[in-house]
Each structure stands twice: as C-alpha cells, then as structure tokens.
Image: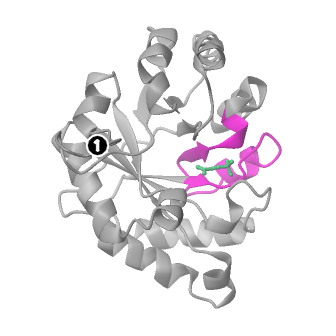
Amino acid sequence: MAERKRLVACNWKMNGLRADGVALGRDIAARAREPHRCELLVCPPATLLVLVGEALGDSGVALGGQDCHTEPKGACTGGVSAEMLKDAGCSHVIVGHSERRHACGETDADVRAKTLAAWRAGLVAIVCVGETRVEREAGLAKSVVEAQLTGSLPDAANPENLVIAYEPVWAIGTGLTPTMADIADMHAAIRTRIPSETRILYGGSVNPKNAAEILALEEVDGALVGGASLKPEDLWAITQAAG
Ligand code: PGA
C-alpha cells in the first residue's frame, strides 16, 4: 500500500496585508527549497492569493483558498468561487472550517455543496470536522464527527480529491489540545468512514512543542496549522516534525 505523504497546511485566516504576506510567502519558499519530506500548502486570504503564489514560485509549496462559494460565478456579492481560486493558482481549498460552520452558520449540506464545487473546479477539498467542548464533555465527540462526515462528504470522494482535517473546535487558537489517546482514537474512527488512503490532518493549536508527538500518531497524516503558520520558525519546526 502506498505510504500517505504527510501534508502541513497553513491556514493564515484573516491575517496579512500585501507586504507581510509576500515576505512570509518568500520565507516559506526559501525554507521549502531545503530538504524536507512532507508536502506544504499555504492558504492565505483571497486578496493575497496571486501575490503569495508568485512569492512561492517554483518552491513546490502549494496554494489554497480558505473557503469557496458553491456557484462558479454570478450574483453573489463578496463571493469567491472555486473556479476563481483555481484561476488564482490554487490546487486546494479548505471547506467547512469551524469558524465558518459556527460563525457563518454553514451546515453539512453547505459543506457538501462546497466540496462538489471544489471538485468541479479541479481543486482538492480539505473538509474540516470537529466537536465543540460541550459535545466532547457530553461524550458526543465521535457521533458529532461521524455525522459531519456523513453529511459533508459526497459519494465521489477519493484520496486524490479529498483531505480530512479533524479540528476540535475547543482546541482552535486556544493552546489546548486533546490527549494523544483522544486524537488517535478520533483519527482511527474517521479512518473507518472515509475512502482508504485519504489523508487525515489534525488541527487545533499545533505548535513546535506538540507537533512531533501528534504527528507520530498512526492515523495522523499531517497538520492544519493556524497561528503557528504565521511564524516561519514555528512553521518550519512543525514541518521538520512532519518529516
Ligand atoms: P490554530 O488554528 O492552529 O491557530 O489553533 C487551526 C485552524 O483553525 O485551522
């Protein structure tokens, strides 16, 4: 069976103006030209996609969007379609991030439609799932994540067009992480619900201190990194841990 190549995906969220986005992109590109064994993906804000794509150049670091609309074009003020992301140089798009599920009210059906839109444009969809603290404390973490997978994944999912990111909502940006046993347990549960060989990333307060331990877990195929991905030294330490 082919080994699943590790993926470190950077989610810059709503951070970066032109000058710092380009500087960070150049820094990541320079480091990525040094030996490393995982794939790297940078997801900047939409306004920076083209500029960061140019900064990444031929470094081999992929470019991704943080969200996409379901329609290819039309009357949707403020929307960015998957086709537009593709045109800007993207190969991937994050869909169903908890900040969109919770702050923007996105449902599993919306995430499923966005996943289909990503595929229509030829993008790999990184579908995010994860439970809230209340759900975990109520013992519902696995059933919540399983329901999200069932509702969000179209039938045509395969390891080439899909990456799953397990991100416990309560671990995002908080410095908190589940126990290693809990991460391993959830990833093993997700593994039984998705096409074999599909990569499963862990996300939620990944940093240079915890990356090696998390990335050593059997079913963890990489990381979706928010805050630490804005700090080149930290990102590179995580990348080395993934190698
Ligand atoms: P964090 O964010 O690494 O800052 O916790 C992860 C994410 O939201 O994807």
Question: For this view, does 49 lie left or right of residue 177?
Answer: left
Q: As drawn, which residue projects farthest toward the right?
A: 209
Q: Quadrant of residue 14?
A: top right
Q: Is residue 126 left or right of residue 124?
A: right
Q: Amino acid at mark 1?
A: Glu
Relative to 132, is 36 above or below? above
Q: Look at the picture and state if 182 lies above or below 99.
A: below
Q: Does dot 1 land on a helix, a strand or a loop?
A: loop
Which residue sits at x=76%, y=32%?
A: 234
Q: Percent from the top left, x then y, of residue 97?
A: 49, 56
Q: Residues within 10 Å of mark 1 (few under 14, many from 20)?
A: few
Rendered position, 80 above or below 169: above
Percent coordinates x, y for residue 139 in the rendering: 62, 89
Q: Is residue 36 left or right of residue 177?
A: left
Q: In this view of the protein, can residue 94 be seen by the observer?
A: yes
- Lateral position of residue 35 relative to residue 207, left or right: left
Compared to residue 7, the image places residue 48 above or below, namely above
Q: Nearer the viewer, residue 144 or 65?
A: 65
Query: Residue shown at 33%/22% (left/top)?
Result: 88
Q: How is the image coloured?
A: one colour
* Residue 59 in view here: no
- Residue 8 among those drawn in magenta: no
Q: Is residue 221 magenta?
A: yes
Mark 1 — residue? 160
Residue 105 x/y as whole percent: 44, 68
* Span colored in magenta: 202-229
Q: Residue at x 56, y 45 (%)?
A: 222
The residue closer to the viewer here, 172 or 19, is 19
Quarter of the image where one finds residue 226: top right
Number of numbered discs overlaid on the protein picture:
1
Residue 162 horizontal/vertical position (percent): 33, 49
Please report the residue visible at 47 percent of the width from the left and 74 percent of the height from the top. Answer: 145
